[in-house]
Structures are given as structure tokens and as C-alpha cells.
Amino acid sequence: MASGMSSYQISSEPLASEAGRARPGRKWKKENKSLYNHLKAIGDYKEPFIDLASPGTLTDVLLVLVVVVVVVVVVVVVVVVVVVVVVVVVVVIVVVVVVVVVVVVVLVVVVEVAIVVVVVVLLAAAVVVVVGSVVAV
């Protein structure tokens, strides 16, 4: 054994970094009490301020807040896009209906004026024929 190194009995439980935990569990601390106390004494082991591996930590809360904000923003954007599309479709339908109504009204007026002109021309022709026949007699 190298000089200055102590021998410690280490349990088979994986270390915190291997187990994906932010700090060793109680079982590891209990089974490796002398190593744990030695690491604490020399300052190589520090209890984390927040245990990032446990649920309900600040990291989890921030992650949930970020997800909620993203979902809310996506929902708002989708709703705004749907409302804009519906408004544009309604405006286009209204414009098409107004144009069709105006065209129909203009056509009706033109046809009525044409009918009046034809009637006036026919009456004038009838008057000319009657006047011509009276003058001829």
C-alpha cells in the first residue's frame, strides 16, 4: 500500500456520481461511515445546498415553469393564428357577397334601362308609322 493512504472498506453500492444522485444515500453513508467522515474532515465532501436528484427542487420547479410558459405561448400563438385566419375568411366571403350583389344590381338596372329604351324606340316607331299613315292619307 502507498504511504499515507488509509485502507477503507467500500460497499458495493455505486457512488453518487455512478448512481446519478447528487449525494450519497443514507445506506452508503452508513456502510462507509469512516470514509464519509474522512472525506468530510478533509473537505472533499460537501453536502449540496439543493439536492438536484430529489423531486420538488428549484430545478424541477423552473423546468415546470419553462414548460408551462412554452405551452401557454404555443397555445396563444395557435389561437391568434386561428382567429386571424377565420377573420380573413369571413372578410373575403363578405367582400365576394357584396361584389356579387353589386354586379346583380347593376345588371338588373342595365336590363331595366334597356327594356325602357326598347319600349320607347318601339313607341316612337309606332308613332312614326301612325303619323306617316295619317299624313299619307
Image (spheres, rainbow, N blue to C red):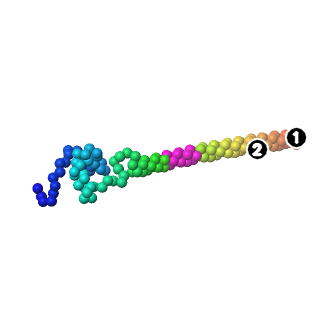
Q: Name above or below for residue 116 compared with residue 36.
A: above
The reply to whether dot 1 and dot 2 touch (C-beta < 8 Å) is no
- Determine the CA span between mark 1 and mark 2: 25 Å
| Number of numbered tags placed on the structure image | 2
Residue 78 located within the stretch drawn in magenta:
yes
Q: Which mark is residue 134?
A: 1
Which amino acid type is marked by label 2? Val
> Magenta segment, which residues?
75-89
Give the quarter of the figure containing the C terminus.
top right
Q: Quadrant of the N terminus?
A: bottom left
Is 30 on the left-hand or right-hand side of 53? left
Q: Nearer the viewer, residue 126 or 100?
A: 100
Q: Is residue 42 above or below residue 13?
A: below
Q: Which one is in front, 117 or 66?
A: 66
Q: Is label 1 or label 2 in front? A: 2
Number of residues whose C-alpha sits closer than 10 Å to that of mark 1, classed few (under 14), some (14–19) or many (20 or more): few
Q: Position of residue 70 (x, y in %)?
A: 45, 49
Q: Residues within 10 Å of mark 2 (few under 14, many from 20)?
A: few
Q: Is residue 105 left or right of residue 58?
A: right
Image coordinates for residue 127, horizontal then vertical, percent: 83, 41
Q: Which residue is mark 2?
A: 117
